[in-house]
Image: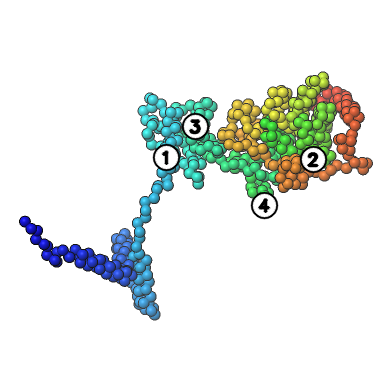
Amino acid sequence: MARRPLPRILSTGGAQLARSRELARTAADSATDILHPLITVARGLGRLAAAGRRRWAETPKDRRGPLLFVVAALCLTVVVLPYGPLLAAVAVTAAAAWQGRDRAPAEPAEDPDEPRTRRLASLYEALVPYFSAADDPAPLYAHGGAWEKAFPGYEFDDSGRVCHLLIRYPAYFTDGEPESRARIEHLLTAKAGRGREYLFTWDEEANELTVTALAPLPTGVPAQRFVTAPGETVLGFTDPSEVQRTLPLAYGAEQRDVPPVVWRTGPRSTEPHLLALGQPGSGTSTLLRSIALQALQHGDVVIVDGGGTGEYACLVGRDGVLAVECGLSGALASLEWAATETERRLIAVNRARQAGQAPPDDTRRPLWLLLDRPTSFTHLAAADGRKDPQALLQVPLRHGRAVNVTVVVAEQFDSADALGEALRQHTRARVVLGPATAEQLKAVLGAPPHTTAPPAVPPGRGYARLGNGAVHRLQVPATPDPYDDSISGALRRAVEELLPPKTTPADGETVPEPASVGGGAAEGSVEAAGAEAVAEAEEAVAEAAKAVGEAS
């Protein structure tokens, strides 16, 4: 059967309907664009009305009367003012236009706390094997558990890593055992982010552990005059939370208040002598130079350099520097004189006390004995059949505190076993510089530090402990050899400005250079001076022993 054709109106109506729909849409868009301000104002008026109704509903009934009175007074004021109704209409229209503007819905963004939440959850899961027990009826740590109860406080830095974390742990955890603590600290160091130093504070009473990421200590603080009292020596700088004191320092072009590690010496000091250990290049010589520059402000210095590197050549011939010895004969003579001087001071102080008088002035002036690598002379003396220079330190170490004699020794770890027993026993102030293992730190300082090792150890960086006090992080002020051309010029000039002036002999003669003095004559004069000092010391030994007992 043949197909009947469709009516013309049906065959051509689709195109006409599409064109009509397009024309209607275009007209609607044009009308919307033209009427958009009116639509915006109308929408804003509706939002303002809704806000007014909410405000009226939230207002207590006892305050609605005063509110109506205030509104009526404002309306009356607007009507009375010239152009008041017009200005009010303009203000309402502007407010309605602002409230009626189109507010595009904000695109859903990623939750910024999600990466931090994942990091805390990872820390929680890592601690579960250490802080959980199979027979715990209500475990605080369990796989898949909630970390919010275990971590009541936490902070993140700008990079998204944990910078402060408060951890609660069960009471049955063995927090009194160093091994258990070390495992937790090692785990947290790895999980919280390597490359930083962390401070661990254990509160056994509250079963809480506080982990704090420490900022690096400043390494570019130059040597300068520190604001300290006589008898105070700045060993370096530490964290603000460790000490209750700050020093104003010139740090580049600005001034800073930096917390120092202050070592107190003198008759009332409980840590009268200091021992510094470190690896080669760790900054022990820098520490001795810094101490020498501070000691020369109020006292005299004797330097014995066993390294033979000329690190203290800048101090030769300076006011207050009694000797800078690099050879065995000179070291023995200087230390024999120091022992005799200590005994002489003891006798003078004892006689003054018996007479009811003040100690003589020459016994009050501090005398510093600075020894760098003295064990090298021990081997030389044993090979030459002479006395060990360390044996001459027993009198200054035992009785120097009462007469302002201070001993400072710097040695390397590989030669620490050769240090004498008297030196180990009487050096209660300890410093460790450079890279060191936890066992070495505990053996030297007597207690392990509460912070992790730094990722990179700059020169002069380490730990310090004074007596039975806490172990502090330490950064020694930059005190390089001013004669070393490889060091920055600004740092060398800072040291040169602190050096005392050159000593001029009374007869006007110049001090000869070490190279121009004959070796045999110099050694003979040294031997004669040493023999004379020993003879004088032997005559005063009996009386000095009695004086020491009464003085102590």
Which residue type does callout 3 highlight? Leu
Disc 3, SS: helix
Q: Quadrant of residue 140?
A: top left
Q: Gap between marks 3 and 2, in whole Å?
A: 48 Å
Q: Gap between marks 2 and 1, in whole Å?
A: 57 Å
Q: Position of residue 344 (x, y in %)?
A: 83, 30
Q: Which residue is mark 2?
A: 314
* Residue farthest along the right direction in this orientation: 507
Question: Is tag 2's residue or tag 1's residue first in the polypeptide sequence?
Answer: 1
Disc 4, SS: loop
Which residue type does callout 4 highlight? Ala
Q: Gap between marks 3 and 4, in whole Å?
A: 41 Å
Q: Which residue is mark 4?
A: 253
Question: Counting other residues with Cα less than 10 Å from the Cα at mark 4, is it few (<14), some (14-19), or many (20 or more)?
Answer: few
Q: Quadrant of the N terminus?
A: bottom left
Q: Is residue 317 left or right of residue 118?
A: right
